[in-house]
Image: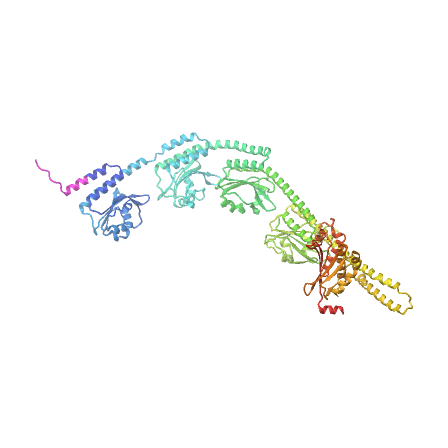
Amino acid sequence: MVQPKEPNANDKQLVALGRILQILREEENADVLIDTTLSYLQAEFDYSLIWIGLYDRLAHRLHGKGGVSPSGNIPLLKQRIVLNPGDLLEQVVIQQRPLAVPDLRQELRAGDWRKTAQIDSIQGTVIFPLRYRDQCFGVTLLGSSLWGAAPRSDEKARLSMVLGALAAALHQIEAEWLRQQVKRPDQPLLSLLTKLQSLAGLGPRLEAIVEETHQFIQPARTNVYWFERNQRFFWRRMSNRQKTTGFSETSQPASGITVQEVSGFYQALCADQLVSIGEAHSSLKADTTSRLMQQIRARSLLAAPILFQDELLGFLAVEGQEPRIWEDEEKSYIRGAAQIIALIAPLDDMENTIEQIQRDRLLTAEIARSLYSEDDWKATLNLAAEQLCKRLRADRFLVLLYDAEQSAFELAHQSQPTNRRPFTTPLETLGAADWQLLEKSTGSIGIENLEGDLRLLAWRDRLLELGVRSLILCNVSLGHAVDGLVVVCHESPRTWSQIEYDLVRIVSQQLGLILHQWQLQRQNEQQQIVSQNLQQGLTLMQQIHQLEPLEQAALKHIAQVLQAPLATLIVWTPGTAIGRVVVSLTSNDRFTVNANATIPVLTDALVQWVLAHEGVLPLAIADLPTETRQWFNGVGIGQVLAIALRTAPEHEPSGILLVADGSDRQWAERHLKALSALASQLAWSRRYLLLTQKLSTQREELKRLNWYKHRSLEELYRSLIPNLKRLQDLGNPKDPLFSTRHQQILRQLNEAVTPLAKVVEAEQWQLQITSRTLSLVSLLKRSLARVDHVLKQQQLWTQVHNETNLTLDGDTAKIELVLYELLLAASQRSAIGGRIDIWCRQIDSHWLELSITDNGVIEPRLLSELENGRAIDWLAHSTLDQLPGQHLHICQAIMKQIGGELNLYTLEDNRSLSRLVLPLATNDRAAAKKE
């Protein structure tokens, strides 16, 4: 028997090769195939670095599946490598030929493998493609630590067989997976037909078709576009529920396609042709393809026409964000789905029309019932908004009321989805063309695409900002002035049908009844508010008894009632030629007036215009004279209301009232009436205060004059009685002493009567202040002499303290009477046997303080009224209307008139203090006046 020979190295290589080839033929798991291949390469070849990466054709990258490296850098062997133009790995993948690199460490095109080679000292490297039938499935990288190392011929042969078998096995696995992934359009179409049987209405049916189509083809978007024949426009009627990601313009679905832009696309659909646009392929011309893809914002498209009886209803489209090769199964499915839509659309339109007519009738009837049965108007508006938005598939519902005073549309009601921003401020008035359109329109007005429409330009920016793209609006009182509008808004451009126009018109006319009542109620409420404010203003002006507070309070209230930023007065005293400006406080710097201006009443054009006009005179800022605009200079002033302060035709006007606002302000009739009433009350109040002040001043002056003359006559009487008695006692006229005494008595009588001449001649109706000098000692002696009889009667003891030889400068006659009045009052309130002290103190070189203290009691109320003045109500009881308060108040006023001061106090020890501050004379002036 022959002994078997030991197998040599070649035999072992052939055995290992056969074993690996058998595994590659039989194994169906790609991971096992790659692991087996890696084990074989590591065992049979002397390479330090072995790596296999599979090629991802869609992402154009290699996915590392494992290998061997000297440093055991496993993450590198498993990582994904993006292929860039010019890289070694991309060259192998594209050319599908092996590539040898002498030194991988020096190869700039090796990418991250160069760094790995430098770390692991890899030099000679060979890269083999995993190629089968001109299709690359990956690469195998073999690296050696020797420079320029390359496989021998037998090694190349074995590597070629093993790697070719691996590529064939990978091809077989991919082909089997693709066979399993082949789409069969018949099954989802049959399933879709079954589902449509249980759905009612075209909307749910279209939604089901779109969702099933999107699930079968799995594009970026699936849409049903409907054709608007009147305007030759495709609008997006239904879209898949999948939301697009990102906010770029290219990620947003198209809202509509105009036939004019893509006429070739429209003609293909009318010819029942399937439109396919994919990677390097299009069934349309290049220019049409470019415009269409720009409009739908996609890079691939498959569109099937929806045709019924040769009439194009629309098309079903699947859109991709990346170039895509559409499969035949996908084309068959989308054509079948489009034909299903064509079959259900007419039937559904008929059903929808019947149902819609019934729903519209019920909707308008329900709103009509709500008008007459619902007390809450807001509930009726909410009902109308809910029903109308649901019927029209709209997003917003607005009810606008026109406010002529503000020249704006007020938001009476609005409804929108919870995730949408509402309108926060009124809408400005419309342009002349839009206003004329609303007034002349006999029905609803529709805008299909707000961005490209020239109507409602004043509102366009605000509407677009809130997402409104199309709308229907209608005047609530067709054939009449625009009092209100009903607006229904949609967030996408769309076409409105005539039925929808009519429905909005009917609902808006019904709601017009509510709005008219609402307007009347609001006007009534506003009138009540004005009436209340007017009554408050009248009451307020009647309660103020001082001129300046009256003017300020009246201006503030008038500005508040008229809701104007500025109210001002030009006032003057009747008979004078110069007026002054009275300005109320304002926080708006744009409405200001020069309060320091003086107005020539007789020549000022504005004043004369207002005085010549009966009632309120409206003026624009351009109507005002240049001289007036120099002080009436607020930059925000655009127009003025002016009225004269006139109480009666026979009375002289005392001023004019001006109210200013911006140029766009519209004055309501109630504001003009309120202004007339408040101006009339202000005129009467000012006249009352001026007249009262004038009469009060005259009364006080006459009281002082009467007191002065009365005291002067008392002094004359006191001086005349002793002298007349002496005349009677002269005795025999023949006595020589008779003539001397007679002359002396006559001289004394003349001195007593002389002061009365001045009183009679110069002070008939008003006190006159005459400045003369008098020594303090003389003043005190003469005053004490006058009151001597009272002092003796009351047994009072008097003493003068700190008396100095000072000279007083002033109306000494009146000062003497005032001091006498104070001493008389102190004597009368002092108890019998009491004490009166007179204190003299020089304050400075100009003033002397003369104080009188006594033990009498002064009524506290009298002290308070002497210090603070009498009560505002002249009819109320006052201590200043009776003695001694009346005389003390007169003395206080006289001292103020001559420049001095008089005050009465109660001291801490309960003594009473009467304090006089008198002017002192300088030596020069005193000497001159005495001469």
- Depth check: 780 or 155 in front? 780
Image location of residue 539, percent across then percent down = 68, 46
Image location of residue 190, percent across then percent down = 38, 31
- Depth check: 740 or 231 in front? 740
Q: Is residue 604 left or right of residue 501?
A: right
Q: Quadrant of the C terminus?
A: bottom right
The stretch of residues the image draws in magenta is 1-18
Compared with 318, 901 (above or below) is below
Q: Is residue 142 left or right of residue 496?
A: left
Residue located at (49% from left, 43% from top): 467
Image location of residue 766, percent across then percent down = 77, 59
Q: Is residue 505 left or right of residue 136?
A: right
- Depth check: 506 or 838 in front? 838
Compared with 805, 149 (above or below) is above
Residue 336 visible in this rendered orientation of the protein: yes
Image location of residue 742, percent across then percent down = 87, 67
Compared with 915, 303 (above or below) is above
Magenta stretch: includes residue 543: no
Figure quadrant of residue 412: top right
